[in-house]
Amino acid sequence: MRFWLRRRPPYLLPMVAVVTFAAFLGFSLFRLFQVEQDMRSNVSENMLWVITQAQVASHRLDEEVHRRVLGDEQARPGLRHDVLTSRLVLLDEGPQRRYLAELGFAAAVDEAFDRLEAIEPLLQDLEPGRHEAADAIYTLLKPMMMSLNRLANEVMIEEWENTGERLDEHRSNLLQVIASVVGILLSGLLLAILLIGALRQRMAAERLERSLTQERQRSDFYRSFAAMVSHQFRTPLAVIDASLQRLIRRGERMSPQERQARYGRVRDAVGQMTRLVDSSLTTARLDGGQVTVTPARHDLREIAQQVCRLQQEATDIPRISLTGPPRLPVRCDRSLAEQILANLIANALKYSSEESSVEVYLARRGDHAECRIVDHGIGIAKQDLPHLFERYFRARNATSSQGIGLGLHIARQLARLQHGDITVTSKINAGTTMTLTLPLSDREATP
């Protein structure tokens, strides 16, 4: 026995507990369903109410008829006729009709409808002093009222007989449900004990997994960065090396203009390497899950103004315009939002001519703020749009420009980390619109 307990499958006891729990629960639900169905099928209480209302409606119809004959202009026998008809319609529908058929009163209800049809034209002849019309109506109403009285008595007797049987059956079902609930509680207690044990094991496994994941992320970070350096940094380093060698060999014989051109190439290559380092580090940090987001309340217009000013100073050409509300509070990480906008605006400037403008539009859209960067440059081919935010992807008409295809990938990842996004629309030789969305601060969001 002890050997079997040691060698039993690990999930056997939980499976037994679950099956037992499900069996008790299913049995109790089945019994409760039976009770509910019995209560649903018991229409006698509703029948008593409907019959009583029909009796009241018939007496009120008779009363209104006599009031009208006696000259009361406020009497409305037609309305009382409609009310009585509606009460009989309730008796003639669905389970009520079947119940009446079992008691043998279905024909009485049909006869009542016939009498109401016969009464309806007589109501048109009611005038003060027309006692013969009132007598004719009463003659039709009296058998109907007697049938309703007999029907009420029969329903009451039937209800008394059925109530005792239902109480006994419900008591038996209730005892079985109580026993099932006790079984459910015991099974649930066993499941809870097993669950606590499993949770403890899982917590220990998760701690180990987190340690392994952190170690793997650090390893991936350095491996990704090393691969990026070896793959992307060769070209700018080669440009720097070639320019410096030329300056060393022929620097004294070069004209000042040629030397300045060489210095400019070296500076461009260094700038490209700086951008490559920044992009590589950010990508590696994203891959390693090491980008920390610190959301707070910031003014998106203020952020956009600062980014536009810095980009404007870098190009020395007034090409950027900013429009939108004077304040647009959002919930974001300011440094990450600045990095995203700087990338999008720099791209708009890079892929459009120096004569064309770049427009930045700010707006509210529901519970998000929207920043659209519109350029009138080379545009992006339709077939390239679905791949634009993929790592290392570059549109086929942009391969002549500097870049490695990481900027937009990084920008979208940073936007999504802040519960925002970046979308794009574009047309070849017409321009591109990049749209950044960020959540509004809680006090600014539209309900």
Image: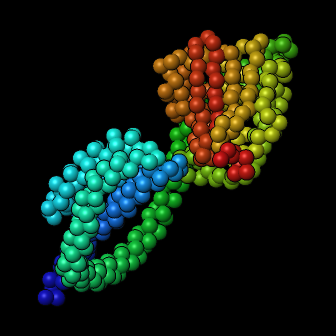
How far from the left and from the top, in percent, is residue 51?
31, 63
Which residue is at the front of the view, 403 or 424?
Answer: 424
Q: Is residue 413 above or below residue 47?
A: above
Using residue 398 as the reference point, say whether residue 326 is left or right of it. Answer: right
How many discs mark residues in the rendered view?
Answer: 0
Q: Quadrant of residue 428?
A: top right
Residue at 27%, 83% in the rendered image: 178
Q: Quadrant of residue 310?
A: top right
Residue at 32%, 78% in the rendered image: 188
Which residue is at the front of the view, 305 or 324?
Answer: 324
- Can the viewer see residue 333? no
Residue at 52%, 51% in the rendered image: 72
Q: Is residue 28 above or below residue 134?
A: below
Using residue 127 as the reference point, say whether residue 357 is left or right of it. Answer: right
Using residue 358 as the reference point, say whether residue 199 is left or right of it. Answer: left
Residue at 79%, 28% in the rendered image: 323
Q: Is residue 88 above or below residue 176?
A: above
How far from the left and from the top, in percent, is residue 74?
53, 50
Q: Quadrant of residue 264?
A: top right
Using residue 30 as the reference point, say whether residue 365 is left or right of it. Answer: right
Which residue of the protein is positioned furthest toward the bottom in this rendering? 2
Tell me the quarter of the image containing the N terminus: bottom left
- Can the viewer see residue 386? yes
How far from the left and from the top, in percent, is residue 281?
62, 43
Q: How is the image coloured?
A: rainbow
Q: Is residue 28 above or below residue 254?
A: below
Which residue is at the front of the view, 217 or 121?
Answer: 121
How far from the left and from the top, in percent, is residue 371?
69, 33
